[in-house]
Image: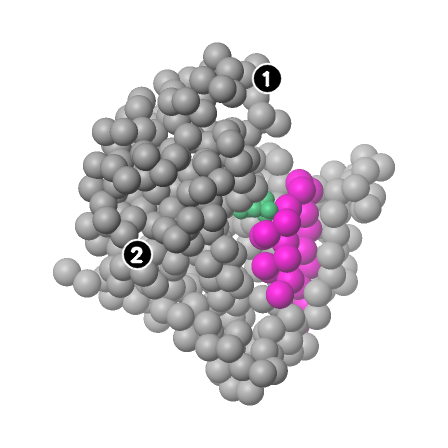
Amino acid sequence: MAIERADGLSSKDVVGIATLSPGEIQLILETAEELLEVARRPIKKVPALRGMTVVNLFMEPSTRTRFSFEVAEKRLSADTLNFSASSSSVSKGETLFDTARNLMAMAPDFIVIRHPNSGAPHRLAGVVPASIINAGDGINEHPTQALLDAFTMRLHFGDLRGLKVVIAGDIRHSRVARSNAYLLTKMGAEVRFVAPASLLPVDVETLGVQAFRRLEPALEGANVVMMLRIQLERQKKINFPSMREYYDFFALTEERLAMAAPGAKVMHPGPMNRGVEIDSLVADGKQSVILEQVTNGVAIRMAILYLLAGGRSDSASDS
Ligand code: CP
């Protein structure tokens, strides 16, 4: 049975996929599809967030997510303020809550937050009136990444139901893998996690996915193969013998990709480590949709901002 889209988002915040219903996910995906058209206009701007202020609070490095939010905010005509840990008073010892309280004194409507601690956006959402959007919290969730991944899959396959999606790499430390598992299982896709035992999450049994210790059997019939980098910055020790061995057993090569379903799409949230989890011939090959993911991220982030703005905005597609 088709998933019925919700009338609106039930919370003032988007802190994770875990707290979104299938209907809300459907609403975000369908709204993003309508907003894709804005990027094709000569003047890529609509007035939906005119007069509203968005604070981008990034306490961890980011290229794609940060720029994608900024582009989305500008396309919706919002005023934007950018804070990073290194250039703000966080580097002088100020806590997240003192930073947020000071930001709230400037009355922003939205705070987009990336933070190294799992749960930081959720705690912030409980104490400030602004809408909080999670741009990645520790090893917990990266909801806008999972939404843009699902959006990219929908554009290629039409429906997420029944899709066979392989997610391979350092799953234990990946907020992208966790958000994708929540989203794809809610929407009826089949998710296969692939990693050495040391890089699988301890709660893998609870996520509704199939776990594999080798890539080859998981690739059989796969429609999407999503590769993840090894997050060395989140590990005290390397959890496998060597990078060379990791490449030999777990990298996506052209030979291995040929084991997936014909026309399978290759995805990666970035940043990529070529020659570690993915071969350059695959990353740049005709089955790769890695740069499409980046393009689609803007539409997803526009949709979330627009929907959270709710009745406060003009029509999303007004010019
Ligand atoms: N996908 C992703 O989160 O990339 P960045 O770390 O560059 O934002």
Rendered residue at 68%/68% (across/down): 53
The magenta stretch spans residue 75: no
**Mark earlier in primary sequence (2, 1):** 2
Q: What residue does disc 2 label? A: 22
> Visible in this render: residue 24?
no
Q: Of discs 2 and 1, which sits in the foreground?
A: 1
Q: Position of residue 291 (x, y in %)?
A: 50, 55
- Check disc 2 and report its element: helix, strand or loop: helix
Q: Tell me the kind of residue under disc 1.
A: Lys
Q: Quadrant of the N terminus?
A: bottom left
The magenta segment is 52-71
Image coordinates for residue 107, horizontal then vertical, percent: 71, 64
Residue at the limit of the structure toward the left, as seen here: 1
Task: Give the answer, above or below, for where 115 lies relative to 68.
Answer: above
Please name whichever residue, 32 or 54, is drawn nearer the observer in this view of the structure: 32
Q: Quadrant of residue 217?
A: top left
